[in-house]
Amino acid sequence: PPRSTLFPYTTLFRSYIVRTSSVEYHIRQKKPSNQALVPVNTKITFTIDKDKIKFNIDGKSHEYIIVSEAAISATQASN
């Protein structure tokens, strides 16, 4: 499975950016009532199932909706 780092950003719902070496995914929780805080810069291993991204942190399973995805340019990947 891909490895990545989770970066939070603020919207109406708890949202995050998952960045791999080649793709950046913007994700959010399915329901505001299910909000769980995920520590900044958390390294994760994830799987993608259609429009969902799934990962575990400290034995707890998380499932988010993929809102958008974009390829990362070589200059972005080096940051």
Image: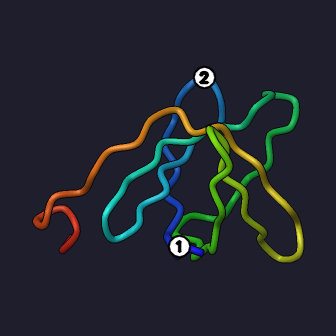
Residue 12 numbered mark, or none: 2
Does 17 sit left or right of 12 as displayed? left
Frontmost of labels 2 and 1 is: 1
Vertical placement of 5 versus 69: above or below? below
Give the quadrant of the C terminus.
Answer: bottom left
Q: Residue furthest top?
A: 12
Category of crowding for the residue at label 2, using alpha-carbon neighbours closer than 10 angstroms: few (below 14), some (14–19), many (at least 20): few
Q: Residue at x 78, y 69 (%)?
A: 56
Label 2 to label 1: alpha-carbon separation: 28 Å
**Residue type pointed to by label 1:** Pro
**SS class, disc 1:** loop
The residue identified by callout 1 is 2
- Tell me which corner region of the image, top left, top right, bottom left or bottom right, holds residue 15: top right
The residue at the point 59 percent across, 72 percent down is 42
The image shows residue 78 at horizontal and vertical percentages of: 18, 74
Q: Secondary structure at mark 2?
A: loop
- Percent position (x, y) of residue 63? 76, 49
Measured as percent of width and height from the top left, residue 64 is found at: 70, 44
Q: Residue at x 68, y 49 (%)?
A: 49
Asked if disc 2 and disc 1 are in contact, CB closer than 8 Å, the reply is: no
